Amino acid sequence: MKYDPKKHHRRSIRLKGYDYSQPGAYFITLVTQDRACLFGEVVDGEMRLNEAGRMVEKWWAKLHHKFPNVQTDAFVIMPNHFHGIIVITSNPVGADPRVCPDETGAHAGMGAHTGMGAHTGAPLRVCPDETGAHTGMGAHTGMGAHTGAPLPEIVQWFKTMTTNEYIRGVKQSGWLPFRGRLWQRNYYEHIIRDDAFLNRIRQYIAENPLRWHLDRENPHRTGTDGDHILG
């Protein structure tokens, strides 16, 4: 299937008026510019990272050092894209981001969405610590970052750090060059509203390499699985 940027470039639409700094779990996807396969290859259903792929993995692991109220969950680095779950808590890293039930005991429901892939409804709620203490939205941590950073700021930092190091890799280690920018300008996000969706996203991430031949980001895919998890 020939790549058509007008057809295949999915715009990232944030939910209007939604506070992306509030505690919750978010599923993000980043795609390389032109869907260039820069991070390794899938062999027999397993992702084999190259140096560039391991570099992306390193910066994902550093997210909680920059943003102390962020924890990372399941993730996968594919040849030309990245899936990961970011958990924004009301506490610095080290606290347990336990998922709380809705106060009414009800969940937001799985069916509603905006039509652009972003789901509506409250995110999966994260419990405060047992003392009920919060860090505050403007407090410095001493690590160069504010607590309470919104999701777009977190994602932009990750994109910037990986881009800067990839450029060094091109210059110093002969990594494949990219055109214009490493990542597409936008990214895709889903608000995770309950445990059932969280578990399905984790399974989707774990099985991503097995479905690479059907993946819509694969320039040489041989079919489609419909991205059934994402709607």
Image (spheres, rainbow, N blue to C red):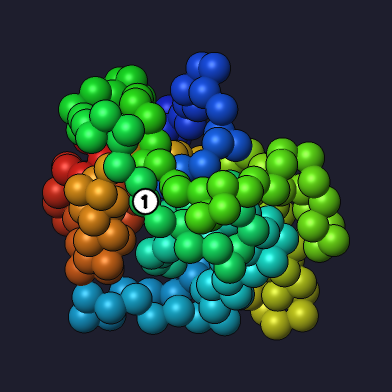
Q: As rendered, which of 181 and 56 lies closer to the eye?
A: 56
> Is 106 on the left or on the right of 33, as rendered?
left
Task: Report the residue at 24% width, 23% height from top.
Answer: 112
Is residue 7 visible in the rendered image? The answer is no
Q: Quickly name the residue at label 1.
A: 99
Q: As rendered, which of 228 and 74 lies closer to the eye?
A: 74
> Quadrant where the C terminus lies?
top left
Where is residue 157 shown, x and y percent of the image?
69, 52
Q: As rendered, which of 150 and 185 lies closer to the eye?
A: 150
Mark 1 lies on a secondary structure that is strand
Where is residue 92 shown, x and y percent of the image?
64, 58
> Is 135 on the left or on the right of 116, as rendered?
right
- Against 187, residue 211 (above or below) is below
- Against 131, residue 49 (above or below) is below
Report which quarter residue 66 is drawn in: bottom right
Q: Which residue appears farthest toward the top when viewing the image?
A: 16
Type of amino acid under label 1: Val
- Against 14, residue 88 (above or below) is below
Task: Report the residue at 44% width, 47% height from top.
Answer: 126
How crowded is the residue under tag 1: few (<14 C-alpha within 10 Å), some, or many (20+)?
some
Is residue 70 visible in the rendered image? The answer is yes
